[in-house]
Structures are given as structure tokens and as C-alpha cells.
Image (cartoon, helix red, strand yellow):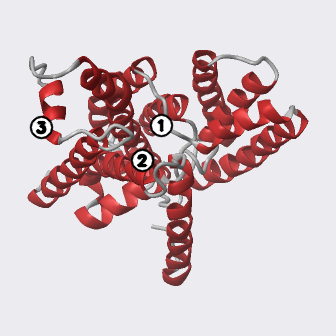
């Protein structure tokens, strides 16, 4: 990574860390930063109440925002580069829709608990990604075909989700709708730790697998001529991206537009596609940390689901990307 990429990554991580510390000090029980740092350091001066508020209530949510944002940012960067389309992301091509359809089915039909819903969402995302890949496969998988099939599968699964919501009783439908908006409220360590572990494990894997990305962006023929095993490389990268997006969605719900926006912001700051994977992960962490902090405090004491805020801010960004692609005559 060059100096610019390192600077962007470090700056984004500092923003995420700052948002985390502010989140730990703000709430119904305000705490000075010195008390928060004492609790985090395990000092004897921390009261039992302060330790409970910081370690059990606020830290899982704040750390979850960083982990989920990192997972979405990295997943979106991989998908966009493999597909060679900046408008592609896990929430656009159907992965989130698969997780949502299974989660809503479990909530509405089986009245499942949070852990079962999380595992179901993970399985739904994985199954949907496999179906999209297989349906897109015709003498190999091309980016535009993957996006088109993903959009079609998204529409179908969205209609299934809408049907389940319309046939459910009002209380169950409300519970499912809350999950569908995407939220980090009330997240515990049992929900956050799997995402943290997934990021720690899959980030090095993604960087290891990223070596053929430059060749893949030149097209399959040139990549084959350069000795890249195109299908194997593409499948491994997409599998990593799907795993990241699926774990993040299972923990926080289908939070929209982070996976779309983070890689685009990182790419424009770094100005070099080949250096943007780590930067995209860091920008994703910063975006979701700031969005969750804003969702908590903008209408305090009331809270917004963070997915509402990311949708409100992300939709204009998507429109701008579409307008720009139309103006320059390409999507890259």
C-alpha cells in the first residue's frame, strides 16, 4: 500500500475509534471519558454500574458497528471488483434479500428466537449466493450476468418477504419489520463476537486471494493468458465476500448501502483500485460507526434503526452513481 492508502485507512480507523469512544460516553447514563477509559483498562476505580453500562450494554453495540461495517465494506469492495461494476454490492445482487426472506419466514411462521433467526439468515444468504452463482454460470460467470441474475433473484425474494409480512399478524409483522430495517440496538456479545471473529479470519484470507484481482479486471481472456485460473479465483473471492456479508447480516440485519458506498468512497480517496480493499474495510467501519452514533443521538431520547439512516443517506448516493455512469457512458 502506498502512503495515500495508508493515510486513508488510518484516518478512517481513527474516525471509527472516535465514534466508538463517543458512543461509550453518551446515553441515558452519561459518563465522562475518563470513567470509560478506567472501565476499559480494568481499573479499580470503576464502579459496578459503570462497568455494566460500558462492557455489557454499550461496548458490544459500538464494537459491533465497527465489525459489521468492516465486513460490509470489504465484502462490497470484493464484489465490485470481481463483477467490475461499482453499482454491485451484496445488498444489490440478492445476498441480503436471501437472508431477509429466511429470517422473516422464521419469525413469522415458526416464531423463532434471535439465535435461530441469525443462523437462518446466515444460511439464507449462503444459499441465495450459491443459487445466483449457478444461475449465472454459462461457460463461466461474467459480471453483468451475475448482476442481472442477482437483481432478478432479489425481486423474487423481496416479493416472498412482502407476502409473509402481509399474511402475518400485526405483532409478528412488526417484529419482522424491525429486523428488516437493520439495527444494532440491544446487540450482545453472543451476536457481536461471531462478526469480529469472521473479520479477523477472513480479512487476511481476502488479501491473500486478492492477487488475481488486477488480472480479472482486464477480462477473462487476458486473465487466462496471464495464467490466472479465472473460475477458481472468482469463486474463492465471491465465497469470501458472501461469508462476510452473511455474518454481518445475521448479526445486524440487512443494513443497506454500506457495502455499496464504502468501496466507492475509498476508491476515490485512494485513487487506485488495487489498494482499496483494506481502505474499503476501514471506511465501512467508519461509516457504520458514525451512522449508528447519529441514529442514537439525533432524535434522543428516541432512537432510529441504523438501517433507516443508511438508506436515507445511501439512496441519493446510488442515484449519483447512476447519473455519473450515464454521463460518462460506463459504470466503472
x 48%, y 28%: residue: 247
- In the foreground, 231 or 55: 55
Label pair 2/3, CB-CB below 8 angstroms: no
Find disc 2 in the rendering and name its residue. 292
Q: Is residue 110 above or below residue 288?
A: above
Q: Which mark is residue 30?
A: none
Corner quadrant of residue 315: bottom right
Precedes in sequence: disc 2 or disc 1: 1
Q: What SS does tag 1 mark? A: loop
- Structural distance between the alpha carbons of marks 2 and 1: 8 Å
x 25%, y 26%: residue: 50
Precedes in sequence: disc 2 or disc 3: 3
Q: Residues within 10 Å of mark 2 (few under 14, many from 20)?
A: many
Q: Is residue 8 above or below residue 53?
A: below
From the viewer's perspective, tell me whether residue 38 is left or right of residue 154.
Answer: left
Q: Residue furthest right?
A: 167
Find disc 1 in the rendering and name its residue. 184
- Comparing labels 2 and 3, the label whose residue is closer to the camera: 3
Residue 271 can be seen in this image = no
Residue 91 locus on image (x, y percent): 57, 47
Quadrant where the C terminus lies? bottom left
Corner quadrant of residue 72: top left
From the viewer's perspective, tell me whether residue 283 is left or right of residue 134.
Answer: left
Label pair 2/1, CB-CB below 8 angstroms: yes
Q: What SS does tag 3 mark? A: helix
How many numbered marks, from 0 up?
A: 3
Q: Residues within 10 Å of mark 1 (few under 14, many from 20)?
A: many
Residue 179 can be seen in this image = yes
- In the foreground, 233 or 53: 53
- Structural distance between the alpha carbons of marks 2 and 3: 22 Å
Find disc 3 in the rendering and name its residue. 34
Q: Residue furthest bottom?
A: 327
Amino acid at each position: 500500500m502506498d502512503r495515500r492508502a495508508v493515510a486513508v485507512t488510518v484516518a478512517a480507523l481513527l474516525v471509527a475509534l472516535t465514534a466508538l469512544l463517543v458512543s461509550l460516553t453518551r446515553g441515558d447514563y452519561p459518563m465522562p471519558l475518563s470513567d470509560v477509559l478506567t472501565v476499559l483498562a480494568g481499573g479499580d476505580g470503576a464502579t459496578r454500574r459503570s462497568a455494566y453500562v460500558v462492557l455489557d450494554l454499550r461496548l458490544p453495540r459500538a464494537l459491533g458497528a465497527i465489525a459489521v461495517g468492516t465486513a460490509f465494506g470489504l465484502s462490497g469492495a470484493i464484489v465490485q471488483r470481481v463483477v467490475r461494476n461499482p453499482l454491485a454490492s451484496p445488498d444489490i445482487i440478492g445476498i441480503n434479500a436471501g437472508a431477509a426472506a429466511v429470517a422473516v419466514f422464521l419469525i413469522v411462521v415458526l416464531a423463532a428466537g434471535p439465535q435461530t433467526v441469525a443462523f437462518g439468515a446466515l444460511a439464507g444468504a449462503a444459499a441465495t449466493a450459491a443459487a445466483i452463482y449457478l444461475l449465472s454460470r454459462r461457460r463461466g460467470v461474467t459480471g453483468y450476468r451475475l448482476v442481472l441474475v442477482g437483481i432478478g433473484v432479489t425481486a423474487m425474494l423481496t416479493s416472498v418477504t412482502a407476502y409473509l409480512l402481509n399474511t402475518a399478524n400485526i405483532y409478528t409483522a412488526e417484529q419482522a419489520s424491525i429486523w428488516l430495517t437493520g439495527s444494532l440496538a440491544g446487540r450482545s456479545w453472543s451476536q457481536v463476537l461471531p462478526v469480529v471473529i469472521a473479520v479477523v479470519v477472513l480479512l487476511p484470507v481476502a488479501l491473500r486471494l486478492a492477487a488475481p484481482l488486477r488480472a480479472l479486471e482486464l477480462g477473462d481472456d487476458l486473465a487466462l493468458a496471464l495464467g490466472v485460473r479465472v473460475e477458481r479465483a472468482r469463486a474463492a473471492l465471491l465465497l469470501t465476500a458472501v461469508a462476510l456479508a452473511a455474518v454481518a447480516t445475521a448479526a445486524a440485519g440487512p443494513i443497506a448501502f454500506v457495502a455499496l458506498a464504502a468501496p466507492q468512497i475509498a476508491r476515490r480517496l485512494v485513487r487506485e483500485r488495487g489498494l482499496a480493499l483494506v481502505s474499503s474495510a476501514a471506511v465501512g467501519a467508519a461509516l457504520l460507526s458514525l451512522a449508528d452514533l447519529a441514529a442514537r443521538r439525533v432524535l434522543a431520547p428516541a432512537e432510529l434503526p441504523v438501517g433507516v439512516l443508511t438508506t436515507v443517506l445511501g439512496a441519493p448516493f446510488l442515484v449519483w452513481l447512476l447519473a455519473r455512469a450515464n454521463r460518462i457512458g460506463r459504470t466503472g
